[in-house]
Amino acid sequence: MDEASVIANRRNVITLPGAGRSEAVLGVKHTYLLEEQQSGGSLMCIEVTVPPGQGVPPHTHVLEDETFYVLDGVVEIRGDDLRGPTTLARGGLFHGPRGRMHGFRNTGQTTTRLLVMATPGSSLQKMFAELADLTAQSEDMPSPQALAELCARYDIVFAPAPE
């Protein structure tokens, strides 16, 4: 498809409050406010509801830039070029460019809500769908090795666990 056709097929998108498709991804609720197919693959935007103590271990995206905006609660961010863990509260933002390691965890006592944007969005949304399928198939969490292997298929590499 040529560029003119791609532009002609783009549409404005509105997601009303409380709307959007939701799925459980490893115990964390994802509500898609903008899905990759709505943006031609250029952007995915989701609201992520993170229970206390939950998060994502340090990892590196080969393909995506990922940005987190804290809507409610607190989140501790770690990154390979940060001076240590950084706590972000409501209104805080973290941008993790592709190729830079980052991870996050809800260190608060209440649920944290994040707005997460990924660009491009197609690969990451497909990975989340596979993780949601794994979540739905069993009450047990998949092994760290199984998760790492699945994520590696989408060019996301987890940092080695500390010894």
Image (spheres, rainbow, N blue to C red):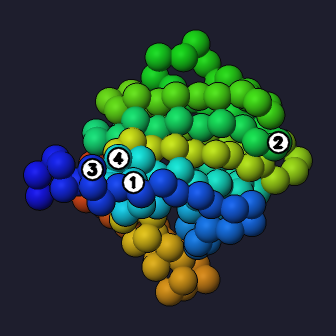
Disc nearer the start of the sequence (1/3): 3
Residue that mark 1 sits on: 39
Visible residue check, residue 122:
no
Residue 138 placed where, x, y %? 54, 85
Q: Cα distance, mark 2 to mark 4?
A: 28 Å
Q: Give amino acid for label 4.
A: Ser
Q: Residue at label 3?
A: 7
Mark 2 vs mark 4: give the one in front. 4
Residue mark closest to the camera, 3 vs 2 = 3
Q: Label 2 belongs to which residue?
A: 73
User: Disc 1 vs disc 2: which is toward the camera?
Assistant: 1
At mark 3, the secondary structure is helix
Q: Indicate the position of residue 6 as horizontal and vertical percent values.
A: 23, 54
Mark 4 burial class by Cα count in 10 Å: few <14, some 14-19, many 20+: some
**Residue at 80% across, 34% down:** 90
Secondary structure type for disc 4: loop
Q: Is residue 118 left or right of residue 32?
A: left
* CA gap, disc 1 and disc 2: 29 Å
Point out the tag, 2 or 4, that comes first from the N-terminus: 4
Say whether disc 3 or disc 2 marks the residue closer to the N-terminus.
3
User: For the residues marked 1 and 3, what is the alpha-carbon distance in whole angstroms?
Assistant: 11 Å
**Image quadrant containing the N terminus:** bottom left
Answer left or right for 37 relative to 133.
left
